[in-house]
C-alpha cells in the first residue's frame, strides 16, 4: 500500500494522496455550490492528513485560487458572473484586507489577538446565520400572505430587502451592473468590498463566507449571481494569497495540484447543481454550513479556555467539520443527479413529441 | 549498636544525596542565568523560521522543484502563481468537456429565488 502515499518535496511529509483528491472533490462541490473558498474545511483537513499548519494554510489558499477559477469558468457560462461588479469591489477589498491585517498586528502587540479574533468570528457567523434564517422566515411569511390574498407568488422576491434602501442612495457615479440587474452607486459595492475585505483580513478567512451574503443582502444580487461573482473575487484574492504564501515558502504545490484534480470534478458538480436548486435552497444550506462552522469555532474557544477539555473539543470540532462537509457534499451530488435525470427525461419527452 | 550504625549510615547517605542535589541545583541555576539571554533571543528567531526542503531523497522533477525552492523563493512563488491558474483552466476545460457529454444544457439556467 506504499503507492498510496507520496512524499511532498517541500514539506517533507508522506501524504495519503487519495485523501487530497477526496478533499479537493468535497471543497470543489461545496465551493461551486455556495461560492465559498472553503478554507474553514480544507485547512483542518490538510492538517489531519499530515501537513504542518503553516503548509496547510498556504496550500489551501493556493488550491483555492485554482478551484475558484474552475468554478468561475462554469458559472460564467451560466451567466452568473458579473465581472463589472467584481472589479468594482476588488479595490475596496484589497484596501480592507490590508487594514484588517494591520488591525491584527495591533491586537497582537497589545496581546489580545486570540480571544478577540475567535469572539469576532463567532459574532460574525451568528450574525450571518441570523440574517439567512431571518430572511427565509420573512420570505415564507410573504408567500403565505400572497397565497391568502390570492396573488401570484413572485419567484424573484426576497425576504430581507435592505439592499433596496441602500440602492436608493444614488451617490455619483451611478453604475448599471447588467448580470446582477442592479443600478446603484459605485460606492455601494466598493464599501461592501472594503468591509468584507476588512473582516476577512481581521479574522484570517477567505472572503467567500462573508462576501456571498453581503452581495445578496446589502448589494441585492440574485443568489446565483452572488455565488458566481463571489467565486471570481475568491479566485483573485486566492491568487494574491498563493503569491504571498509561496514567497514565504509555505506552499506545497504538488498537493495543491492533486487537490485540483478532485476540485475540477467537484466544481462542475457543485456549479451545475445550482441550476436545479432555487436561490432560497442555496441560502438555507449556506446557513446550515455557517452554523456548523460557528459551532466548531465555539468548541475551539472552549478548548482554549479549558485545557482539560482540549482533546475532546478539538476532536469533536474535527469530526463535526468533516461530517458536515461530507453530508453537504453528498446532498449536493444527490440534487445534481436528480436534476440531471429530470432534465434528460424532459429532453427525451420533447424529442418524442417533436 | 547495629541499629545506631545503620541509622548513622543512612543519615550519611541522605546527607550525601542532599548535598549532591544542592550542588546540581546550583549548577543548573548558573547555566540557566547564562542561557537566559539566549532563550530570549531564541523566541525571536523562532518566528522567522526558515524551512529547507530535503532534496536528498528526491529525484527528477521533484528534486528540481525542491532545489528551486531552496535557491529562490521568488522564482518558486512566480512559478506557483503561473502554474495554478493555468492548471485550473486546463483541468476546468477538461471537466467541462466531459460534463458536456452528459447531454444537459450547460449554457443557461432559470433565475428563481423561491
Image (cartoon, rainbow, N blue to C red):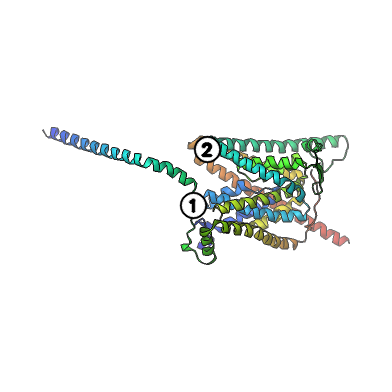
**Disc 1 and disc 2 on one polypeptide chain:** no
| Residue A261 visible in image | no
Determine the image quadrant of residue A173. top right
- Which residue is at 49% across, 52% downward? B50
Q: How many marks?
A: 2
Q: Position of residue A96 (x, y in %)?
A: 66, 42
Residue A108, disc? none
Quarter of the figure with the C terminus of chain A: bottom right
- Which residue is at 77% across, 46% downward? A278
The single residue placed furthest to the bottom in the displayed view is B60
B3 to A333, vertically: above or below: above
- SS category of the residue bearing label 2: helix
Circle 2 marks a residue in which chain?
Answer: A
- SS category of the residue bearing label 1: loop
Cα–Cα gap, marks 1 and 2: 30 Å
Indicate left or right for A189 with B37 as reference.
Answer: right
Indicate left or right for A62 with A90 as reference.
Answer: left
Write down the residue under mark 2: A303
Residue B50, disc? 1
Circle 1 marks a residue in which chain?
Answer: B
Amino acid at each position: 500500500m506504499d503507492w498510496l502515499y507520496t512524499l511532498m518535496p517541500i514539506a517533507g511529509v508522506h501524504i495519503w494522496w487519495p485523501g487530497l483528491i477526496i478533499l479537493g472533490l468535497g471543497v470543489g462541490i461545496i465551493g461551486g455550490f455556495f461560492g465559498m473558498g472553503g478554507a474553514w474545511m480544507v485547512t483542518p483537513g490538510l492538517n489531519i492528513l499530515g501537513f504542518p499548519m503553516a503548509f496547510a494554510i498556504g496550500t489551501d489558499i493556493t488550491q483555492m485560487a485554482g478551484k475558484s477559477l474552475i468554478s468561475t469558468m462554469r458559472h460564467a457560462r451560466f451567466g452568473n458572473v458579473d465581472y463589472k461588479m467584481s472589479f468594482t469591489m476588488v479595490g475596496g477589498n484589497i484596501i480592507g484586507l490590508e487594514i484588517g491585517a494591520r488591525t491584527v498586528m495591533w491586537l497582537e502587540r497589545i496581546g489580545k489577538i486570540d480571544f478577540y479574533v475567535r469572539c469576532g468570528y463567532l459574532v460574525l457567523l451568528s450574525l450571518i446565520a441570523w440574517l439567512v434564517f431571518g430572511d427565509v422566515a420573512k420570505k415564507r411569511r410573504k408567500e403565505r400572505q400572497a397565497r391568502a390574498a390570492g396573488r401570484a407568488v413572485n419567484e424573484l422576491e426576497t425576504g430581507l430587502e435592505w439592499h433596496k434602501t441602500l440602492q436608493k442612495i444614488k451617490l455619483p457615479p451611478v453604475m448599471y451592473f447588467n448580470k446582477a440587474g442592479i443600478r446603484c452607486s459605485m460606492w455601494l459595492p466598493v464599501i461592501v468590498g472594503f468591509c468584507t475585505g476588512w473582516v476577512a483580513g481581521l479574522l484570517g478567512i477567505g472572503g467567500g463566507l462573508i462576501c456571498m451574503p453581503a452581495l445578496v443582502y446589502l448589494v441585492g444580487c440574485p443568489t446565483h449571481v452572488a455565488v458566481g461573482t463571489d467565486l471570481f473575487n475568491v479566485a483573485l484574492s486566492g491568487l494574491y494569497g498563493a503569491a504571498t504564501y509561496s514567497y514565504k515558502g509555505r506552499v506545497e504545490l504538488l498537493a495543491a495540484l492533486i487537490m485540483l484534480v478532485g476540485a475540477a470534478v467537484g466544481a462542475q458538480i457543485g456549479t451545475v447543481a445550482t441550476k436545479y436548486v432555487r436561490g432560497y435552497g442555496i441560502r438555507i444550506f449556506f446557513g446550515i454550513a455557517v452554523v456548523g462552522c460557528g459551532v466548531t469555532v465555539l468548541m475551539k474557544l472552549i478548548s482554549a479556555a479549558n485545557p482539560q477539555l482540549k482533546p475532546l473539543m478539538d476532536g469533536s470540532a474535527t469530526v463535526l467539520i468533516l461530517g458536515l462537509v461530507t453530508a453537504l457534499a453528498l446532498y449536493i451530488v444527490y440534487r445534481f443527479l436528480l436534476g440531471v435525470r429530470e432534465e434528460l427525461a424532459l429532453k427525451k419527452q420533447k424529442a418524442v413529441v417533436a | 549498636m547495629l541499629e545506631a550504625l545503620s541509622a548513622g549510615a543512612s543519615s550519611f547517605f541522605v546527607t550525601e544525596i542532599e548535598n549532591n542535589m544542592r550542588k546540581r541545583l546550583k549548577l543548573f541555576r548558573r547555566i540557566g542565568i547564562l542561557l537566559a539571554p539566549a532563550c530570549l533571543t531564541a523566541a525571536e528567531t523562532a518566528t522567522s523560521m526558515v524551512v529547507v526542503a530535503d532534496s536528498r531523497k528526491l529525484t527528477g522533477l521533484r528534486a528540481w522543484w525542491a532545489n528551486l525552492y531552496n535557491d529562490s523563493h521568488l522564482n518558486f512563488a512566480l512559478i506557483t502563481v503561473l502554474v495554478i491558474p493555468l492548471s485550473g483552466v486546463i483541468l476546468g476545460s477538461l471537466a467541462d468537456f466531459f460534463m458536456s457529454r452528459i447531454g444537459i444544457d450547460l449554457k443557461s439556467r432559470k433565475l428563481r429565488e423561491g
